[in-house]
Image (tube, rainbow, N blue to C red):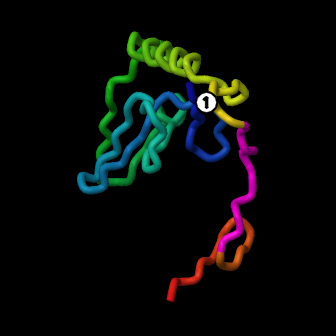
Amino acid sequence: MGAIRLCSRSACRNSAVATLTYVYADSTAVLGPLATYAEPHCYDLCEQHAGSLTVPRGWEVLRLAMPATPAGPGPDDLLALANAVREAASRPRASDPVPGQRSAHPALEAPAAAEGTRRGHLRILREPS
C-alpha cells in the first residue's frame, strides 16, 4: 500500500479524494475519482478544493461520478498481496548459506584495478588504440 496522497493545492494538508486532469485540445477540465496512481500531469484534490473548482472562461468542466464511499480492497488486491507474501517467503534470505557455495565475497568489495583513471564511483576508460 502506498502513502495517503495529499491535496495538490498549496498549503493544503487534507487527503485527496479526486483527480483533476486538463484536456487542453478540448478546453476541458475532467474531475473524477482519485486515480489509482499519482500521474505527473494530474492534480489530486481534497473534497473542499474539488467542490470549489473553477476553470478559465470558455472552458468546460466534466465532473465524473464520485463514489459515495472509498473503495476497499477488492479480490484482485488481496490476491496480489497474498502472492507477494508467498513470493517473499519462498526466497532464501541473504544471510542463509547456499549449499555447495564457497565463502561469499562482501557485497561492497572494491572492484579489481583496471586501466583508466578512477574518480569517485565513476571510471574513465581509455579507448583501445
- The answer to whether one can see residue 37 in this image is yes
Residue found at x 38% / y 53%: 56
Q: Position of residue 19 (x, y in %)?
A: 44, 36
Count neighbours of disc 1 (C-alpha within 10 A) and say few if under 14, some if 14 to 19, many if 20 or more: few
Query: Along the horizontal axis of the image, is 76 left or right of 87?
Result: left
Residue 55 vs 111, above or below: the answer is: above
Q: Is residue 113 above or below residue 49?
A: below
Q: Nearer the viewer, residue 118 or 64?
A: 118
Q: Is residue 105 magenta?
A: yes
Work out whether 64 lies above or below 11: above
**Residue name at image x 43 percent, y 13 percent:** 79
50 to the left or right of 123? left
Percent from the top left, x then y, of residue 5? Answer: 57, 33
Magenta residue span: 103-114
Residue drawn at (47%, 16%), measured in percent from left and top?
83
Q: In which image quadrant can residue 66 be found? A: top left
The N terminus, quarter of image: top right
What percent of the width, then of the height, locates residue 63? 33, 33
Q: Residue furthest left?
A: 26
Query: Tag 1: residue type?
Result: Ala
Q: Nearer the viewer, residue 54 or 118?
A: 118
Left or right of 65 on screen, residue 109: right
The question of residue 93 being in magenta is answered with: no
Residue with the mark numbered 1: 3
State the residue at coordinates (28%, 53%): 27
Callout 1: SS:
loop
